[in-house]
């Protein structure tokens, strides 16, 4: 088959033999692709130092009838070297790569996911300690997978909940105080945390919507669309504090566990590297 060129990020690599490697890539046009890199450990002309985890590459791939494509050569676009100088930023990047491996299906174009990943890596280079870029990335990936939680209204009675504290009883969304009275040990989100999550989700959706084929991933209120004026009474007045960040992290962990059925190993590594 004809060789195709694409942009890609290395999400996983494993040794196949003394000289060969199997490389998993998240590509812009072809989605997740597993590729066989012949003599990858020896050929600096074709691969150089471009097969590091998290590297952004220009790749030349030859599709094959089998699941494994053939990686012909690469050109390094950015290895995000500044990011790798921070263990905290590196752990966040490794976690993001693990999320991509789990969420992105083989061979299905996901340009929005690729763009979100590149955006995150650039943000981590500039601000390795910032929490918002990773949270926004995760909300984007949930959106792209069709798992975006409903945050503006109660999933049971559909009452508007922005501006009040809520409970999380499932992976579908949030529940108002009245509907959660009989829930066993629900996760509680403060009203400030809920608004922060909602705004990050809307930003993530706006970024993904720049891709022409992105799915509409969460339902917005049809009447009285949430304008800046209508949100003025509940918008946070300052950056999230430790309590709000902890609530958002617990909320996303709960969603991933519900949808994936497991906790990603990279999640524990991220905790270890946190300051």
Image: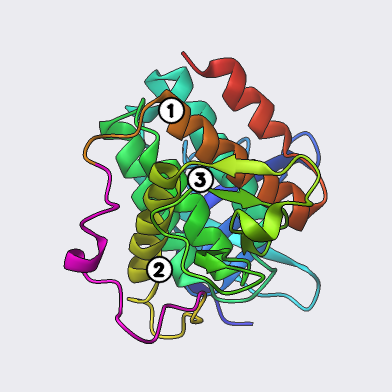
Q: Which mark is residue 205?
A: 2
Viewer-side label of 3, 1:
1
The crowding category of the residue bearing disc 2, from other C-alpha atoms within 10 Å (few below 14, some 14 to 19, many at least 20), is many
Q: Earlier in the sequence, mark 1 or mark 2?
A: 1
Q: Position of residue 88 (x, y in %)?
A: 46, 22
Residue located beneath label 3 in the image = 47
Q: Is residue 17 magenta?
A: no
The answer to whether 207 appears left or right of 3 in the picture is left
Q: Position of residue 160 (x, y in %)?
A: 46, 68
The crowding category of the residue bearing disc 3, from other C-alpha atoms within 10 Å (few below 14, some 14 to 19, many at least 20), is many
Q: Is residue 151 placed above or below 267 in the rendered structure?
A: below
Q: Earlier in the sequence, mark 2 or mark 3?
A: 3
Residue located beneath label 1 in the image = 89
- Secondary structure under tag 3 reads loop
Q: Between marks 3 and 1, how big is the CA–CA gap?
A: 25 Å
Q: Is residue 10 placed above or below 81 in the rendered structure?
A: below
Q: Main secondary structure of the magenta part?
A: loop
The crowding category of the residue bearing disc 1, from other C-alpha atoms within 10 Å (few below 14, some 14 to 19, many at least 20), is many
Q: Residue at x 41, y 58 (%)?
A: 198
Q: Which mark is residue 62?
A: none
Magenta residues, as a range? Answer: 218-236
Q: Are marks 2 and 3 in contact (CB under 8 Å)?
A: no
The answer to whether 94 appears left or right of 231 in the picture is right
Residue 89 is at least partly visible in this image: yes
Viewer-side label of 2, 3:
2
Q: Position of residue 95 (x, y in %)?
A: 58, 38
Query: What residue occupies the far left of the structure in this picture?
Result: 229
- Secondary structure under tag 1 reads helix
């Amino acid at each position: 088959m004809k060789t195709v060129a694409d942009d890609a990020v290395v999400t996983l690599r494993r040794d196949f033999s003394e000289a060969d490697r199997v490389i998993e890539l998240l590509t812009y046009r072809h989605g997740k692709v597993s590729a066989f890199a012949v003599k990858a450990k020896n050929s600096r002309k074709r691969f150089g130092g471009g097969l590091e985890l998290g590297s952004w590459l220009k790749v030349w791939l030859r599709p094959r009838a089998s699941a494994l494509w053939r990686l012909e050569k690469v050109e390094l676009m950015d290895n995000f070297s500044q990011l790798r100088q921070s263990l905290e930023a590196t752990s966040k990047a490794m976690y993001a790569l693990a999320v991509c491996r789990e969420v992105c299906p083989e061979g299905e174009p996901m340009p929005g996911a690729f763009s979100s990943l590149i955006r995150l890596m650039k943000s981590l280079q500039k601000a390795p300690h910032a929490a918002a870029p990773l949270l926004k990335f995760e909300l984007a990936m949930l959106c792209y997978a069709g798992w975006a939680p409903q945050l503006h209204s109660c999933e049971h009675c559909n009452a508007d909940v922005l501006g009040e504290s809520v409970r999380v009883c499932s992976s579908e969304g949030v529940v108002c105080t009245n509907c959660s009275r009989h829930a066993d040990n629900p996760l509680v989100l403060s009203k400030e945390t809920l608004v922060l999550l909602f705004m990050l989700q809307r930003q993530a959706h706006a970024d993904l919507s720049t891709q022409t084929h992105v799915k509409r991933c969460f339902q917005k209120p049809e009447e009285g669309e949430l304008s800046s004026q209508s949100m003025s009474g509940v918008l946070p007045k300052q950056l999230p504090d430790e309590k709000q960040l902890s609530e958002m992290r617990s909320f996303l962990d709960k969603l991933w566990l519900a949808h994936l059925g497991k906790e990603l190993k990279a999640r524990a590594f991220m905790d270890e590297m946190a300051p």
